[in-house]
Image (tube, helix red, strand yellow):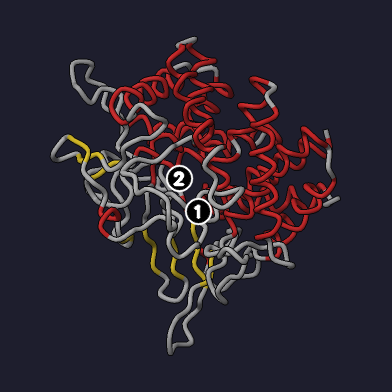
């Protein structure tokens, strides 16, 4: 077992990085941030998510879903420790999300959240769904139903506008043309040989449709969730992940490190809801895929091929924390010690790559997310993403709850 106090110290340092260094405290984005969308309605409460250590340059990438997951992580840390600072920061992140939502009831975009990701004026459907957990956690922790109401409106907009009717969703909603556009990746991305190329994707992320059904009783949410889940569990390519869909590189057989988390972990929710072993089996296959992808030092790489080989660079610390969250779900069902052994290797690795003694104060407390090759240069290969720190907090808190409660 990992010593509780050591893990708590790492959680505290990670939360402090989020609240004191990463989180934006002003309405306008700091001028040193690159790659942000001018269409975000306000920036206060969001997180500077990208930091290139070689250039000492901040950047932004999809602050909506990152802020939603950060709000969840901070709520979890608050529940564990009682530290009000974490809750205050989570509330600020939640307010950022609420400020991105269309609230005019007569608008056809009523409920839409400006979850801008790949393009400066387009919303990703997955990014909306992946921000919802933060709102649900805030509602639970604060008792304020405004967060649940906002989540219901957002998921309803996705159901009514992005859902294609067969477990698949459109992405890339243009805020200037007010319609869905074909994503640019359709021009170059190819699925594995023998699999169809689809415009939509089966977005099971965070089992949010099932959770919304349980909150509202609206049967359509449950129907959508199981249509997605049943498609996913019968279309794994290869077993335990989904190279047949973006963002994995299908034709090259390179798996995205969080694909099995977003679409695999909801199988736990399906299994707990129905008791049907087919969902547990899919969850287990995802856990086995992650076991094979985990490196000996406990890490995971962004590009893992079909033989579980990786490049020399391309560490992805958020991916192994997401794997840990999935493994802990498996352990809660079958009590197989191999899952927790992998979790402990992952957490210990992330604790080792947490910045503690630094000359660059922007790094203090953060978890290193990835390494990148800098050709012909001695510049630092380290790159921060807020996701590395966010998912570490979630996994570390869950571990303490499971092992020390």
- Residue at mark 1 to residue at mark 2: CA–CA distance: 7 Å
Q: Are marks 1 and 2 in contact (CB under 8 Å)?
A: yes
Give the quadrant of the C terminus: top right
Q: Residue at x 71, y 37 (%)?
A: 329
Q: Is residue 232 above or below residue 57?
A: above
Q: Is residue 244 left or right of residue 122?
A: right
Q: Is residue 294 above or below residue 120?
A: below
Crowding at mark 1 (Cα within 10 Å: few <14, some 14-19, many 20+): many
Q: Residue at x 55, y 38 (%)?
A: 234
* Image coords of residue 260 (percent x, y): 57, 47
Q: Residue at x 31, y 51 (%)?
A: 29
* Image coords of residue 283 (percent x, y): 65, 39
Q: Residue at x 34, y 45 (%)?
A: 198
* Image coords of residue 361 (percent x, y): 53, 66
Q: Nearer the viewer, residue 184 or 277?
A: 277
Q: Which residue is mark 1?
A: 386
Q: Which residue is mark 2?
A: 66
Q: Residue furthest front?
A: 194
Label 1: state its secondary structure. helix
Quarter-of-image position of residue 97: top left
Crowding at mark 2 (Cα within 10 Å: few <14, some 14-19, many 20+): many
Of mark 1 and mark 2, the one earlier in the sequence is: 2
């Amino acid at each position: 077992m990992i010593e509780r106090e050591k893990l708590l110290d790492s959680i505290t340092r990670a939360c402090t990085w989020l609240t004191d260094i990463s989180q934006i405290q002003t309405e306008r984005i700091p001028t040193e941030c690159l790659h942000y969308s001018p269409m975000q309605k306000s920036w206060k409460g969001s997180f500077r998510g990208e930091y290139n250590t070689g250039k000492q340059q901040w950047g932004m990438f999809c602050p909506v879903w990152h802020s939603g997951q950060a709000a969840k992580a901070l709520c979890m840390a608050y529940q564990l420790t009682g530290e009000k600072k974490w809750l205050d920061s989570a509330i600020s992140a939640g307010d950022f999300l609420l400020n991105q939502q269309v609230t005019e009831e007569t608008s056809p975009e009523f409920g839409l959240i400006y979850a801008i990701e790949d393009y400066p004026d387009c919303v990703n459907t997955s990014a909306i769904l992946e921000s919802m957990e933060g709102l649900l956690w805030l509602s639970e922790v604060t008792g304020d139903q405004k967060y649940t109401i906002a989540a219901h409106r957002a998921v309803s907009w996705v159901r009514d506008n992005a859902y294609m009717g067969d477990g698949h969703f459109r992405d890339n909603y243009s805020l200037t043309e007010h319609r869905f556009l074909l994503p640019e990746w359709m021009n170059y991305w190819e699925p594995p040989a023998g699999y169809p190329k689809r415009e939509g994707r089966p977005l099971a992320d965070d089992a949010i449709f099932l959770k919304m059904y349980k909150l509202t009783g609206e049967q359509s949410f449950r129907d959508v969730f199981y249509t997605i889940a049943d498609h996913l569990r019968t279309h794994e390519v290869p077993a335990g992940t989904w190279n047949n869909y973006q963002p994995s590189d299908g034709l090259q057989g390179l798996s995205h490190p969080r694909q099995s988390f977003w679409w695999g972990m909801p199988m736990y929710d399906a299994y707990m809801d129905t008791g049907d072993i087919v969902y547990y089996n899919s969850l287990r296959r995802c856990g086995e895929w992650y076991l094979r992808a985990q490196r000996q030092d406990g890490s995971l790489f962004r590009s893992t091929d079909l033989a579980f080989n990786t490049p020399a660079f391309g560490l992805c610390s958020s991916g192994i924390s997401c794997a840990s969250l999935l493994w802990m779900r498996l352990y809660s069902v079958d009590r197989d010690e191999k899952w927790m052994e992998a979790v402990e290797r992952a957490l210990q690795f992330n604790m080792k790559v947490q910045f503690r003694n630094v000359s660059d104060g922007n790094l203090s407390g953060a978890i290193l997310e990835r390494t990148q090759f800098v050709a012909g240069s001695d510049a630092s290969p380290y790159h921060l993403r807020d996701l590395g720190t966010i998912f570490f907090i979630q996994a570390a808190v869950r571990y303490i709850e499971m092992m020390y409660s």
